Amino acid sequence: MHPFHDIPDSVIQRARNTRLVIFDIDGVLTDGSLFFDNQGQEYKAFNSKDGHGIRMLLEGGLEMALITGRQSELVLHRADNLKIPRDRIWQGYRDKRPAFAELLAKTGLKPENVAYVGDDVVDLPVMAQAGFAIAVGDAHYYVRQHAHWTTQASGGRGAGREVCELLLHAHGKLQAKLESYLT
């Protein structure tokens, strides 16, 4: 049995209405750790399972975007690796609402067709507008309280994959995608 059998119908419906998912970076697609060398060069660790989930999501016909408060070339490298278009990446937005508004204008989507995955209180203004607000398992307690759904996995530790698979499941595409790996 798939791991989504006990998820409430209201959550599945929100996932089914989703056409685009927005991921925060630090604390969501990474564990939130920031590493700097003596020259100030920044390093982040991304989870390969999350990355494969994103690829499956994009292959499944859903769209995605990244909105992050920090500015980092690493994010662009990771996005290029995953085939996320650069016009779907907003960096340096501590207040993420303008990026969200730009994304809606660019895509023509309504907020109810967008999911947002966050981990900290700076994500709440967009989570409050999105049709499907998702918190990672180790998100701040106040963020989890205001989410429609919380992953079991922590940020940077499989939460992104969990989100992608839930969305694919809700759209009726997960099982066929998984079975395609057996042929």
Image (cartoon, helix red, strand yellow):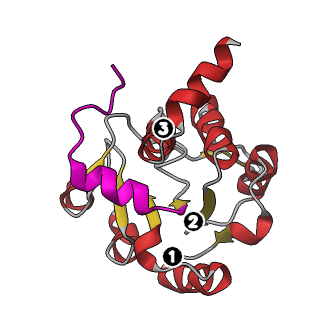
Callout 2 crowding tier (Cα within 10 Å): few <14, some 14–19, many ≥20? many
Cα distance, mark 1 to mark 3? Answer: 28 Å
Location of mark 3 (residue): 165
Q: Residue at x 57, y 65 (%)?
A: 68
Name the amino acid type tagged 2: Thr
- Residue 18 in the magenta stretch? The answer is yes
Split into 4 quadrants, where in the image is the N terminus? top left
The kind of secondary structure element at disc 1 is loop
Q: Secondary structure at mark 3?
A: helix
Disc 1 residue crowd, few under 14, some 14–19, many 20+, Cα 10 Å = some
Residue at image mark 1: 94
The quarter of the displayed image where residue 86 is located: bottom right
Q: Position of residue 164 (x, y in %)?
A: 51, 43
Q: Residue furthest top?
A: 182
- Looking at the image, residue 177 sits to the left or right of residue 77; the answer is left
1 and 2 marks in contact (CB < 8 Å): no
First reached walking from the N terminus: tag 1 or tag 2 = 2
Q: CA distance from mark 1 to mark 2?
A: 7 Å
The residue positioned 32% from the left and 33% from the top of the image is 4
As drawn, the label of residue 68 is 2
Element at label 2: strand
Which numbered disc, 1 or 3, marks the residue closer to the eye?
3
* Residues shaded magenta: 1-20
Query: As displayed, is residue 136 above or below residue 176?
Result: below
The quadrant of the rendering that contains the C terminus is top right
